[in-house]
Amino acid sequence: MKLTIAKIAEMAGVSKTTVSRVLNNSGYVSSANRTRIKTIIEEHGYVPDFRAISLSRTRTEIIGLIIPETSGPFYGELLSGVEESLRDKEHFTLIMTFGNDTPSRVRERYISIMRQKRVDGIIIFDPEVDQSTVQEVSRLSIPVVILNREFPDLPVHSICVDN
């Protein structure tokens, strides 16, 4: 049997709202109820279902990162830095690797996956990214940041390094 918030509430003799407050660490909950709920959660190994949570919220706290590769010192450090920064803000990273040599059907599939996962934003760091790919991504109606390239005619943000 999968443990749900409703089941935890029933076991603890409290409302689902009280369990939600404990899980989200928000609102007032008596110390006795908080302890009882946390004990049930720990004893039963409850893990929140992030898909269900994201459906009830407008945000998923997932940021898509498109880079040409994850190996090598440069991209490895970039990836670590982005993930660390996002983790500090309690966000997660969905990493997809592709470049211009990736077939368009694969790029379309990746973009479709990002749409399905409902990412809150996309960071693209691919020096070879073409305008058609950026245009496709910008149609998702979510914030897009392009690193080291500018596309002034598209509704995306750019961060460029001036060497």
Image (spheres, rainbow, N blue to C red):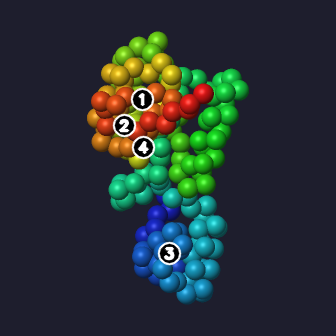
What amino acid does circle 3 point to?
A: Ser
Instruction: Assess disc 3: are there few (<14), some (14-19) or many (≥20) residues with their C-alpha within 10 Å of its C-alpha.
Output: few
User: Residue at label 1?
Assistant: 150
Task: Answer with mark 3 or mark 2, whichever residue precedes in sequence.
Answer: 3
Q: Distance between the residues labelled 4 and 3?
A: 26 Å
Q: Confirm or deny contact between disc 3 and disc 2 (CB under 8 A).
A: no
Q: Which of 9 and 78 is in front in this view?
A: 78
Instruction: Assess disc 1: are there few (<14), some (14-19) or many (≥20) residues with their C-alpha within 10 Å of its C-alpha.
Output: some
User: Residue at label 2?
Assistant: 156
What amino acid does circle 1 point to?
A: Glu
Q: Position of residue 66 (x, y in %)?
A: 49, 30
Residue at 47 percent across and 52 percent down: it is: 61
User: Residue at label 3?
Assistant: 26
Task: Answer with mark 1 or mark 3, whichever residue precedes in sequence.
Answer: 3
Q: Is residue 63 above or below residue 89?
A: above
- The nearer-to-camera label among 3 and 2 is 2
Residue at 35 percent across and 43 percent down: it is: 142
Q: In this view, does 19 lie above or below 141?
A: below
Q: Which mark is residue 121?
A: 4
Instruction: Assess disc 4: are there few (<14), some (14-19) or many (≥20) residues with their C-alpha within 10 Å of its C-alpha.
Output: some
Q: In this view, does 63 lie to the left or right of 46?
A: left
Q: In this view, does 40 lie above or below 140?
A: below
Q: Confirm or deny contact between disc 1 and disc 3 (CB under 8 A).
A: no
Q: How far apart are marks 1 and 2 (CA)?
A: 9 Å
Task: Answer with mark 1 or mark 2, whichever residue precedes in sequence.
Answer: 1
Q: Distance between the residues labelled 1 and 3?
A: 41 Å
In this view, the residue farthest toward the right is 73
Q: Is mark 3 on a helix, strand or loop?
A: loop
